[in-house]
Image: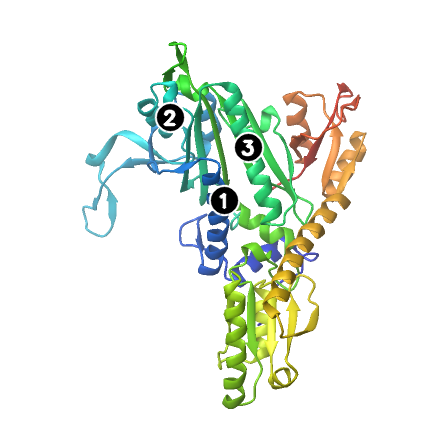
Amino acid sequence: MAKDFPTRAENYSQWYNDLVIKADLAENSAVRGCMVIKPYGYAIWEKMQAALDRMFKDTGHSNAYFPLFIPKSFFSKEASHVEGFAKECAVVTHYRLKNSADGKEIVVDDDAKLEEELIIRPTSETIIWDTYRNWIQSYRDLPLLINQWANVVRWEMRTRLFLRTAEFLWQEGHTAHATAEEALEETMKILEIYANFAENWMAVPVIKGLKSPNERFAGAVDTYCIEALMQDGKALQAGTSHFLGQNFAKAFDVQFLSKENKLEYVWATSWGVSTRLMGALIMSHSDDNGLVLPPKLAPIQVVIVPIYKNYDQLAEISEKALAIKKALTDKGISVKYDDRDTQKPGWKFSEYEFKGVPVRLAIGPRDLENGTVEVARRDTLEKEIYQMTDIELKVANLLDKIQQNLFQKAHAFREENTFKVDTWEEFKEQIDKGGFVLAHWDGTTETEVKIKEETKATIRAIPFNNKPENGKCILTGRPSKERVIFAKSY
C-alpha cells in the first residue's frame, strides 16, 4: 500500500489531510466545509462515543434529543450568547421550493417564507432551556442531568477534516441544579471525565484549567477546559465544561420552588466534546508511516495475516489462526483474520500498518512447525516471535503496553515542548517555534487581545495546578501572580 504523502517535517498540514483521506477516515463532501465520515473513521468515533456514554450514565446522566431548528428569537434572550454565535449561524428562511417561470431551475418560493426564521443548531442551550421551563417546577425535579448526541452547524469559513467543519458530531450535556455549589461540582466532575477519557482511552495527556474571560464560552460565567499539545507544537482544545450560573435560567424564566418554599432560578452547566477528538487522536500519535491508534479505540486491535504458497497450507494455517482469533475474541479483543487471496502478505502488512492496527500476527508453515507466531507492534514497529501457548494472554498484555507507551511518549513530548519565558522578545521567539509557553499576564482582556493580534497566540488555560509566582506581564510589565499557558492553536 503506497504511502505517497509528505512527512510531518516536510508539511505537517498536508501530512494530516492526506493521512485522514488515505487511511479511509473521512473525505470532503459535495457540501462546502462538510465531511463524509467513512466507516473506518466512524468506527473509531463509535468507540469514543460508547466509552463516554458509559461514563455519563455511570454518573447519573440520561440521554435525550432536542430539535435541530431553533427559533431566532430564542437567541436574542441571552445577549452574550447570540453575540458569540451570530457570525456562525446558518438560517432557514423558507420552507418550500418551486420551478422558475421558465421551468429551467428550482427557486425559493417567496410565498413560503417562514413567519419566524429558524437557526440550524450551533449549540442547544436556548432550545433546551426553553424546554426545561416546562420540566422544572420544584426542588424535587432537580438535579436534571441530560446529555444529547447530535450534529451541529457552525458556518466556518476555513475548514479542515475533523478539526473544523461546518457540520460536526458531538455530545452536549445540559444540567440544572438547585445551588451554585452543585452546578460547580457538576462542571468539575465532567471535566474530570473528559480528562480521564483523553488520557486513559485516547492516550493523550491534557492540562486541566480555567479559560480566560476572552476565551470562555458565550453565555458562561466560567469555562473549564482540557488542552492537548499536538506534534507540530500547536494546542488543541479537547473538551470544555461550562458553569453557566443563572444566565440561561433567567433568560428563559426557569424557576423552582425551593425546600424553603421560595421561588428561585436554577443553576446551570453545559459541556461537550466533538469529532474534533478524532483530529487530536491522529495528530498526537500518528507518524510518517501512517495512522497510529491506541488499542482502546482501534476498530481492529489485532490483525492475523496468513503466509502461504498454496491452498493446502492456507487450510492448515487457517485452522490455527481461527483458533487464535477465537481465544483473543473471548478476551474481548477485536480481531480480523485477513485470508484474502487478492493481495500478497506484504501488501496487507503495509495496509494495516498504515491504518494503525496496534498488533499484527503473521503465521506461516514454519510457524506451525515451531508453534510460534510473528508479532509486530504498530507503535514501535518492532517484531518479535511468540510461542503460541497462551497467545491471548501475551497479546492482551502487549495491547496494554502499547496503550501505556503511546501515553508516555505523548507526555514526554509535551514536557519537552513546554517552556517558561519572562520577556516579550523571548515570548515571540518561542511562540513561533511552537509548544506550550508559560508566561506572566496582567489579567486584562486588552493585553490578551493585543498579544493575539501580534503573535496569533492565545491563552489556552490557566492551569489548576498553578503555583503562585510573582512576576511581570510579558507585554505590559504590570504585576502578575501566576503564569498562564499560551500557544498557537487549532
First along the sequence among labels 2 and 3: 2
- In which quadrant of the rendered view does residue 397 lie? bottom right
Gap in Å between the C-alphas at discs 2 and 1? 24 Å
Q: Which mark is residue 438?
A: none
Judging from the image, what secondary structure is the residue with disc 3 in?
Answer: helix
Q: Nearer the viewer, residue 166 or 325?
A: 325
Judging from the image, what secondary structure is the residue with disc 1 in?
Answer: helix
Q: Which amino acid type is marked by label 1?
A: Leu
Which residue is under mark 1? Answer: 52
Position of 454 with respect to 60 (left or right) is right
Q: Which mark is residue 129?
A: 2
In this view, the mark in front (2 or 3): 3
- In which quadrant of the rendered view does residue 350 lie? bottom right
Quadrant where the C terminus is found in the figure: top right
| Mark 3 surroundings: few (<14), some (14-19) or many (≥20) residues within 10 A | few
Task: Please report the residue visible at 50 percent of the width from the left and 27 percent of the height from the top.
Answer: 218
Classify 52 as above or below 398. Answer: above
Task: Please report the residue visible at 68 percent of the width from the left and 31 percent of the height from the top.
Answer: 463
Which residue is under mark 3? Answer: 189
